[in-house]
Amino acid sequence: MSKRSTPTSQAIVVIRKELRDWSRDRRSIITVLISSLLAPGLIFFLFNSMANRQRSVEDVTIPVVGAANAPALVDWLRQQAGVTITDGPADPEEAVRTRREDVIVVIPQNFVKNFSASKPAQIRLVADSSSQNSRPKVQRVRSLLQTYNGQIGSLRLIARGISPAVASAVTIEDVEVSSSQQRAAQILGFIPLFVMISAFTGAMAISTDSTAGERERGSFEALLVNPAPRITIAAGKWLAGTMTGMLTVLITAGLLFAMFKQLPLQDLGIRFRLGSPELIRTLSVVLPLCPLIVAIQMYVATFAKSFKEAQSYLSFLMMAQMVPGMMATMNTMSTKAWMYYVPWIGQQTLLTDVLGNKPISPVVFVIVGVINLTLAVAVLRGTAGLLHREKIIFGR
Amino acid sequence: MIRIDNLHKRFGEVRAVDGVTFDAADGQVTGLLGPNGAGKTTTLRMLYTLMLPDEGRILVDGIDAVADPQGARFALGVLPDQSGLYPRLTAREHIEYFGELQGVTGADLRSRTDHLLKMLDMTAIAERRVAGFSHGERTKTALARAIVHNPKNVLLDEPTNGLDVMSTRAVREIIRRLKEEGHTVLFSSHVMQEVSVLCDTIVVIARGKIVGSGSPDDLRRQTGHENLEDAFVSLSGLEPEGTPS
């Protein structure tokens, strides 16, 4: 007879087995990689395209048709920072319509005549207002031309002995509300959501394989005949799943922060910093949620007779967990105190605070962690209870 | 030593096990013989503590399996009805996993595992993942992990079901050895021949009730049939209506 094993050593045996089994499953490893690459990849793409658009406005190439008609204007344009002048195509309208050019300046032949006579000299700005991408560039060219207009007008007034201020009845100061910083903040708002999704998908393999998978293979019966309490077996599986969930979160967070080091945030005028303190705070918000995520996944998956059935249940669950994050990114709800203490909503709220550099009391972190862990253990007990049901042990 | 006393289990209206009583003694092989659906698996499931009887008592080495299932499990080695394996683990890892859950560790576990692998003629496939195993290889793996902790009482639910000749022989050999070593072996089968070859005591079960028990000779005497198969058919009431017994 062997010496009796203790529940602790049995739980460790189960953890080791589940992790070994998991590490040999190519599908689960690929899931971890994809889910941890998703967030950094998408955010990198969004920011980069924003930065590119910004740069395209600063360094602008203006095709001009009929440059010879207004050499002074063209020379002035050339002297402006970041402006390059090229010869415009023969058919400017067609070129813009086919999106070969974003904007073309056409100077008609009668420009000189009108200009010399101090009459309004016409300039045509060919643009396609339905093109979202060219809009900032068109705006830039238009404002350059307006600046030129203002300068020449002022000079003419001074030449006639009139103060240019007389001509400006009203001055307009632009206050841009939808700045690129704000759009950047919107993108950053997705980070909590993505990190929580990665926690979910990373743990899914073990949560389903060790419950519905055991049922599907018919291996529960043999496993539960062993002299290990159900709670011990469930706890071993739960801890193994939690480890894989946390691992995925760590990889995701690591990639996110590595990526933020590479991003041209300065070009966007964003004063956003993600350093090690923010990293640690982000992790201390999301990691305590992992045990609860896994416990709920396991509880739900235990009802499923097969791996596939479990996966479809869990994909509904994943959508449910995305709801608070979605609501937070779509309309900024005013933060109320209770929101910190409800799982998922709390993580979303806390992460928004962390990324927005708002100070958070460490006490809140501790309370949130304790709440999550308590709920996780309660759900785990529920799962252990399910393992007593004859329908679940034997029902295939 | 296993004692089962007046065991009942009902599923809805069906009395799956209806007052089963028998003993399985140390150093003996006891066969639970019955047609499909007779209540063999349900009886064994209650015995190996995964199913709760509606009524009745089960003693495993004097431990009440209903009141102290955990204690009873330490004294049991079970090859259950469903013996699913983990496709990504090797045969050796299966045996060691269950050994460790039972508290067998270190050098003890290694030597026990090697011994079983050798006895079941599995040394060549020990380090292979079970995903590609044949039915026989799977059953042998499940059997090895069931008895890795050298349990006093061994329960086998239809261990030779669907096995080829060589695997059947290996399983029979294990059963004989366990008997020689003084274990209590209880296995179920619906194959008369198998039971008659291996068993010291046969318990015939039909429609949830024990319809006969004793040594093969006892059964022949009870039924008046020289042929053991005729005795089985007669006891289990399988013969068609109107046929004289």
Image: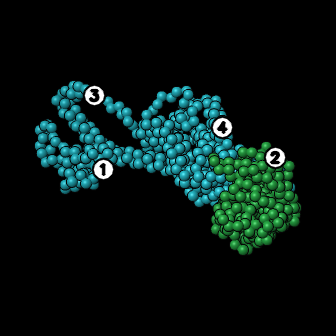
Which chain's residue wears label 1?
A
Circle 3: residue type:
Thr
Q: Badge 1 local density, few (<14 within 10 Å), some, or many (20+)?
A: many
Earlier in the chain: of badge 1 and badge 4, it is 1
Circle 2: residue type:
Asp
Judging by the rendered image, the residue that carries numbered circle 1 is A61
For the residues marked 1 and 4, what is the alpha-carbon distance in whole angstroms? Answer: 64 Å
Tell me residue B233's x, y (percent).
72, 65
- Residues A167 and B88: in front is B88
Q: Tag 3's secondary structure?
A: loop
Judging by the rendered image, the residue that carries numbered circle 4 is A378
- Residue A296 image-quadrant placement: top right
Q: Does residue A211 sit above or below A271 in this rendering?
A: below
For the residues marked 1 and 2, what is the alpha-carbon distance in whole angstroms? Answer: 90 Å
Give me the chain that's green.
Answer: B
Q: What residue do we see at 47% from left, 39% from top?
A: A326
Both marks 1 and 4 on one chain: yes
Q: Tag 2's secondary structure?
A: strand
For the residues marked 3 and 4, what is the alpha-carbon distance in whole angstroms? Answer: 65 Å
Which chain's residue wears label 2?
B
Q: Nearer the viewer, mark 1 or mark 4?
A: 4
For the residues marked 4 and 2, what is the alpha-carbon distance in whole angstroms? Answer: 30 Å
Residue at the outermost bottom position? B165
Q: What residue do we see at 65% from left, 57% from top?
A: A218
For the residues marked 3 and 1, what is the alpha-carbon distance in whole angstroms? Answer: 29 Å
Circle 4: residue type:
Ala
Q: What residue do we see at 38% from left, 36% from top?
A: A178
- Residues B45 and A279: in front is B45
Q: Which mark is residue B64?
A: 2
Judging by the rendered image, the residue that carries numbered circle 3 is A171
Earlier in the chain: of badge 3 and badge 1, it is 1
